[in-house]
Image: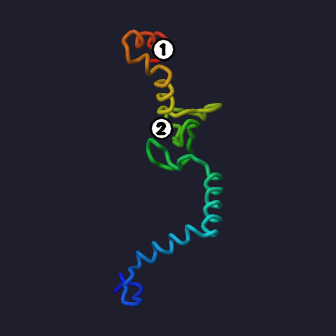
Amino acid sequence: QAQRALVAGGLAVSIGQLLCFFYGAFRQSDEYKVLSAGMEAIMEQEDRFDDFCSVCLDRGFLLCCEGCSAAFHLSCVNLSAVPEGEWQCPACVAAAEWDRYGDALLSGRGRRRAEARGAL
């Protein structure tokens, strides 16, 4: 009984079918377009950073990475104070190093050059 919402002309229609129909109709409406535009504006205003530490998953005073959405407690990234300027998390620093020296690391001679530069 709970699965059937309407019986008209001998045709039983489930609640799920009704929801799909009305949602499809709503997505075609002007109201949906207005609400979608409003939600996009709200999402753009919200910060893009996580609300929890990427290491311990706790909340609190967090340092945000400028390269991704990750946030960290100072102690979780072995810092005693907030660094000046832009800061990047260890994962972003490693990715940048790989972008810079990754191809060179694939060969022995390139690896030695990268080590000499202090990249490894």
Q: Which secondary structure, mark 2?
A: helix
Picture coordinates of residue 36 (x, y %)?
A: 61, 62
Counting labels gives: 2
x%, y% of residue 87?
Answer: 58, 33
Give the side of residue 14 with respect to residue 99, left or right. Answer: left
Q: Give the image's coloring scheme.
A: rainbow
Q: In the image, what residue occupies the spot 51% across and 70% down? A: 24
- Image quadrant holding the C terminus, namely top left
Q: Residue 73, position in %: x, y?
A: 52, 41
Instruction: Give the residue at mark 2.
Output: 76
Image-quadrant location for residue 14: bottom left
Q: Which residue is pictured at 35% across the width and 81% down the height?
A: 3
Residue name at image x 49 percent, y 34 percent: 77
* Residue 40 - label: none
Question: Which quadrant does the N terminus fall into?
Answer: bottom left
**Amino acid residing under circle 1:** Gly
Q: Is residue 50 toward the left or the right of residue 104 in the image? A: right
Q: Residues within 10 Å of mark 1 (few under 14, many from 20)?
A: few
Q: Nearer the viewer, residue 60 or 34?
A: 34
Q: Which residue in the protein does label 1 denote?
A: 118
Q: Where 66 falls versus 96 (above or below)?
A: below
Label 1 to label 2: alpha-carbon separation: 25 Å
**Mark closest to the chain's N terminus, 1 or 2:** 2
Name which residue type carries label 2. Cys
Q: Are marks 1 and 2 in contact (CB under 8 Å)?
A: no
Crowding around mark 2 (Cα neighbors within 10 Å: few <14, some 14 to 19, many 20+) is few
Vertical side of 24 occupied by 6: above or below: below
Residue at far left of view: 1
Q: Nearer the viewer, mark 1 or mark 2?
A: 1
The x, y position of residue 64, in whole percent, is 57, 40
Residue at the image position 37 percent from the left and 85 percent from the top: 11
Q: Nearer the viewer, residue 65 or 15?
A: 15
